[in-house]
Amino acid sequence: WDDTSREILDGATNPVARQALEHQLQPMRAALMGQVGRHEVRQQHTAVISSADASNNSAANAAAAHPNDPLVQQNTRDTIDRNIGVVAQLEGFTKAQVDAARETQYTRLHLGVIQSQVDTHPDAAREYYQAHIDEIAGTEHAKIEKMLEIGGIKVRTQGFAADILSRAKNETEAIELAHAELSGEEEDATIARINSHFAQADQELQRRHRTASDEAWKAYDQGGMDAIPAATLAAMDPQAWVRMQDYARSRAKQDESDIVTNTEKYREMLTMAAKE
């Protein structure tokens, strides 16, 4: 700006024109400097707010990772309060705005701690929720309570499914026990676990069957049926084992047929040679 202004003034044809230009340029320069200053202030505000939010997020993550450490929990609260104070002073918050900011940050903090426990320790998560419910936004209460309910069902049905599977001989019997001993969401969730257990077991069995079958055929190709280890045969799908036996018998018959045919051809050649 200063260099450009100097060039403009140097181009004035007389002192009067130069003075007139100076009067015009001075308020323009003041306005520009004001805009630059305001932009710098906004940039500084934005940087401070972003830094405070990142600090709050990091502190909340630490609290979620250590839900039972009172020192970490208190340090997190202190960090949030300090950052809110800095932003509030910078932005000129009213008390209502400070309270709203604190509710937002504390809600995020408490939600993270609850989520970190609900799948493994739902009772502890519920106790924490009840102890801090006044600091959590009311709009989040229903969602958290539903999450706690599901977490409790999840943990309980783990025990139910394990108990039933230890007593049942097969999937059908396990499902019958679940129907007889449970009801509602606990019944549905337990049956889902039972189905998943047997589905995974079936997938694993099929994988072992395929592996054993591949190993058996490889051994057969190298040395026949006697080359297949007993452990491999035992691990095969029984139907696959039957198909292999059928193939081996068919192959043996084919080999025997080939031998007979060759012998007959050999005798015919001898007979022809004798007649000649």
Image (cartoon, rainbow, N blue to C red):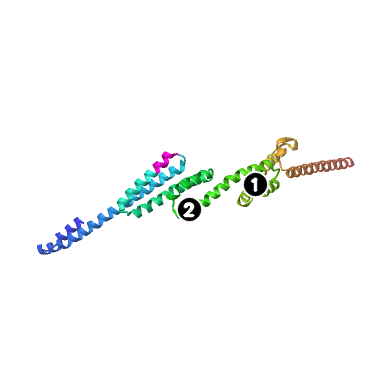
- Location of the C terminus by quadrant is top right
Q: Amino acid at mark 1?
A: Ile
Q: Which residue is mark 1?
A: 194
* Quadrant where the image shows the N terminus: bottom left
Farthest residue to the left: give it. Answer: 15
Q: Does the segment drawn in magenta span residue 17?
A: no
Q: Is residue 62 above or below residue 89?
A: above
Q: Residue at x 35, y 54 (%)?
A: 97
Q: Earlier in the sequence, mark 2 or mark 1?
A: 2
Q: In the depicted view, which residue is nearer to us: 176 or 273?
A: 176
Q: Amino acid at mark 2?
A: His
- Front residue of 131 and 217: 131
| Vertical relation: 219 (above or below) 7 | above
Give the SS element for disc 2. helix
Q: Which residues are magenta?
A: 69-76
The dot on residue 155 is none
The reply to whether residue 51 is visible in this rendering is no
User: Which of label 2 and label 1 is nearer to you?
Assistant: 2
Residue 230 position in % (x across, y down): 73, 35
Q: Is residue 53 left or right of residue 220?
A: left
Between residues 195 and 175, which one lies in front from this camera angle? 175
Q: Identify the residue position indicated by label 2 in the image.
A: 141
- Residue 28 x/y as whole percent: 20, 61
